[in-house]
Image: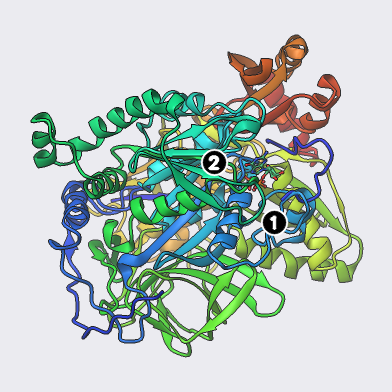
Amino acid sequence: MALKSGMKASTRQAQKRQVQSPVCSAVIAVPVPVMAINPQAAFKAGCRRPATTRLSMRRAARMTCNASAAAAPAPTYDSRREWPLDKYRNIGIMAHIDAGKTTTTERILYYTGKSYKIGEVHEGTATMDWMVQEQERGITITAAATTCMWKGHRINIIDTPGHVDFTLEVERALRVLDGAVAVFDAVSGVEPQSETVWRQADKYKVPRICFVNKMDRLGADFYNCVKMVVSNLGAKPLVIQLPIGSEDQFKGVIDLVKMKAIVWTGEELGAKFEELPIPEDMADKAQEYREKLIDMIVEQDDEVLEKYFEGEMPDEATIERLIRKGTIAQAFVPIVCGTAFKNKGVQPLLDSVIKYLPSPLEIDAVQGVDMNDAEVAMIRSADDAAPFSGLCFKIMTDPFVGSLTFCRIYSGILEAGSYALNSNKNKKERIGRLMMMHANNREDIKVAFAGDIVAIGGLKDVITGETLCDDKSPIILEKMDFPDPVIKIAIEPKSKADLEKMGVGLNKLAQEDPSFNFSRDEETNQTVIEGMGELHLEIIVDRLRREFKVECEVGAPQVNYREGISRPNDVRYVHKKQSGGSGQFADVAIRFEPGEPGSGFVFKSEIKGGSVPKEYVPGVVKGLEECMSSGSLAGFPVVDVTCVLYDGSYHEVDSNALAFQIAARGAFREAMGKCGARLLEPIMRVEVITPEDHMGDVIGDLNSRRGIINKFEDKPGGMKLVQAYVPLSEMFQYVSVLRGMTKGRAQYTMQLERYEVVPPNIQQDIVAKSKAGVA
Ligand SMILES: Nc1nc2c(ncn2[C@@H]2O[C@H](COP(=O)(O)OP(=O)(O)OP(=O)(O)O)[C@@H](O)[C@H]2O)c(=O)[nH]1
C-alpha cells in the first residue's frame, strides 16, 4: 500500500493606468460506452491520460483529425444544441507579463463582434481585466472567460495572467483547455514566464499556436523570436507567416500557405486589409520559408510525402489539413505575427485558431476513476449522449450572484435546475443557475453541452478541482495539482468587528484560490496568510480591505520554510497509558527515509502476520500526517519523507486507532531528532534585464543576497540578462532596490526553482526566532 499526499514583482515603474452562423444539428442521442482502461496506468501525475494508453489514444486522436472524424464514432448531439462540436474551439491566451495577451483578446472580441468598442489596457478599460486591482495596475490577475464567434465557429477564450504569482490561474485554465495561443513580444522574444507557461502547456499536452505580437515596436525581431522558440522552449516552430517590414514600417504579413501578402491599409481600429501579390523584394525569402514549411508538414502523411518526393506539391487544402494534423499531434507549432495594438494580424490569427487548433472531438478523451473504486480507470468522450461529467476549475465570488463555479463540461449535458453529483464528496448539488460568462458579465442559459465552459451559480460545497457528474454513472476526473505557498504575512484586524469580517473574507478568498492559505494563532491573536509571492498577498489584502471592508495591520513578508530529514533511521515507539479505566496501548516500528524532492508524504505498510492489525493502520497514517503539517524544528511543514511501517504490536483490549495515531506521532517526533532534521528554503530563479552600464551593480547586489550567478545573455537594445539563483528570504522589496540602483531602467522576474538546505548559521537564527515566537 502506498499513500501519497502530497516578479516580475511589480517591475512597472509607476503603476501604469490601465493600458490596456450557427449550424444546427439535431441527432438522435445514442449512449456512448464508458471504457475501462488499465488501472495501474491511471492517474500518472500531471497527465491527461494513463501512460500505457497514451499511445493508442493519441493514435485515435490522430485518426479523428486525419480522416475528418471518419474513423471515430460521430458524436451524438442533443436536439437543443446550436453548435456542433467540431465547430468549437476552447482556447487560452498565455504568455509572459505584458506580452499583449489582454490587448490581443480585446481585439479578438472586437473583430468577432463581441465588443463594439475596444478597451485598452493602458486606459484601464479592457473588458477582460474587470477586477479593480487589474484596472489600477494594468495586469491580469484572474483568468477571465468569454465566448465569441468567428467564421461559423464558436471560440471560448480564457485570457490568463502573465505574472508568476498567478501561475495557478494559468494552470487551472490549461487543465480544461483544448488549445492555446502563446503571445510573445517581438522585441523581448521568449521571456521567463512564457517558458513557465509553455512547460505547463506541455504538462497538459495542449496544442499551441504562437503569435509574435508588437511587430510595430522599435527593435521588433520576428526571426529572433522564432530562434528563441527553438532555443528557450525546445519546440519546433512552423513559420506560416512572414512579417512585411517591422517597427513603424510593419505593414502586414505574407501568408505562406496561400502565398499572398496581407496588407493593412491603416492602423486604426477596424482597419481594412487587402490580399496582394507578394512584394518582389520578399519573393526569395517567402519561397525559402514556403519550402521549409512544406518539408515539415509532408511528414504528417506518408502518401503526400511520397507524392512530394515524386515532385507533386500538395494543394492548399492538403497543406492546411497537414498543418492542423501536426499542430494537434504537437509535432510543431505554427507561428504567426502582427501587432494587436495597431490592429494588424488579429484576423489571420483567428483564422489560424479555427483552422489549426483542435475541437473537443480531437483531443484525448478525459480520464478519471470510478468513484467507488479508484483502481478502476475510466474515460469520457465529448458527446451529449454520454453521462454528464464536468470539472470545476475555478470559483469566483460575485457580488451579485454569490459564488460562481466555472465548469468545463467533458461529456453529456447539464440543465439549470437539475442535480449533479459532486463525486469527490459523494454529495448531490443543485444546479441553481447556469451561465455563459463574458468577463464578469453573465448570460443565463438553460442547458449546457459537452465541450462547453460555463459558470454555475448556487453550488454549496464544491471546491476547485472537484468533479460534477451524473449520479448514475459516477466518475472522478483527474485532479489538478496546486503549488504550496512560499511566502506568508501576519495580519491583525483593528477591531472585533473587523476580525469577524476578516474570517468571512478569508474563507471566501481561499475558496476561490487554492494557492492561498490562512491560519489563525489564538495565542498571538494573529492571522497568517500564505501565498505565491508579495504581489499575490498584496492583492489578497487589498481585496479584504475593499470587498470585505476589513481594517487591518499588515506585517512584513516572511518565507514559508519547509522542514525535511537528511538521513534514514528506524524508530520504535510504544504508547502505553494505564489510568483507572480502560488503558491505551500501541507499539509501532517505522522506518523514516528522506523522499525524492517533491514526493511529499509517502506511507508504506510492510506489516506481515498482523503485528499491527489492518484496522489500526489508518490511525498510524493520520498520526504521521498530522506531524507533517508542523515540524519539530520551527513548526514549518515537513516535506519529502517516506514512512514505512514494518512492525509493531497491539493489546487485545487496550489498542485502538487513536492509540496508534498517538504512537505514530511519538515516533515521528523522535525521528525528526534521529534523522537529522533540517530547514529548507525556497530558491528563486531571478532574471534581471538591465542596461550594460548597471550590470556590475546588479551582479554585486545579487551576490550580497547569497545569490549564485548562473548566466549572462545579450538582449535586444544593448540590454543584458543576468540570471541568478537567490534565496527568497533575500528578495523582499527587491523591486524598489533595483529601481533605485538602475534609475528604473532594469526589470526583473523571479520564480520558484527548488528548495535547498538553509546554511547552519541562518537555520540557528530562524529556529531561535521561531522559539521566541517571531518567525
Ligand atoms: N506597441 C505595442 N504595444 C502593445 C501591443 N500589444 C499590447 N501592447 C501594450 O503592451 C502593454 C501590455 O499589454 P497587455 O495586453 O496588458 O499585456 P498582457 O500580456 O495581457 O499583460 P498581463 O496580463 O499583465 O500579463 C499595454 O500597454 C499594451 O497597450 C502591440 O502590438 N504594440
User: Counting other residues with Cα less than 10 Å from the Cα at mark 2, is it few (<14), some (14-19), or many (20 or more)?
Assistant: many
Question: Residue at (50%, 66%) from the top-left corner?
Answer: 148
**Residue 124 pos. (x, y %):** 77, 55
Residue tagged by mark 1? 519
For the residue marked with disc 2, what is the amino acid?
Gly
Query: Does 499 appear above or below 635?
Result: below
**Residue 656 pos. (x, y %):** 41, 64
- Taking depth in this image into account, of 418 and 743 the one nearest to the observer is 743
Question: Residue at (71%, 32%) from the top-left corner?
Answer: 767
**Residue 77 pos. (x, y %):** 27, 79
| Marking on residue 627 | none
Q: Earlier in the sequence, mark 1 or mark 2?
A: 2
Q: CA distance from mark 1 to mark 2?
A: 47 Å
- Taking depth in this image into account, of 482 and 447 the one nearest to the observer is 447
Query: Does 87 appear above or below 598?
Result: below
Q: Is residue 765 visible?
A: yes
Ligand 1 location (quadrant): top right
Q: Is residue 576 visible?
A: no
Left/right placement of residue 8 relative to residue 39 reads right
Left/right placement of residue 2 relative to residue 213 reads left
Query: Does 89 appear above or below 572?
Result: below
Residue tagged by mark 2? 338
Q: Quadrant of residue 632?
A: top right
Regarding mark 2 in the picture, which secondary structure is present there? loop
Left/right placement of residue 573 relative to residue 733 reads left
The answer to whether mark 2 is within 8 Å of ligand 1 is yes
Q: Quadrant of residue 293?
A: top left
The answer to whether mark 1 is within 8 Å of ligand 1 is no
- Taking depth in this image into account, of 69 and 741 the one nearest to the observer is 69
Residue lying at the far bottom in this picture: please name it.
417
Which of label 1 and label 2 is nearer to you?
2
For the residue marked with disc 1, what is the amino acid?
Ser
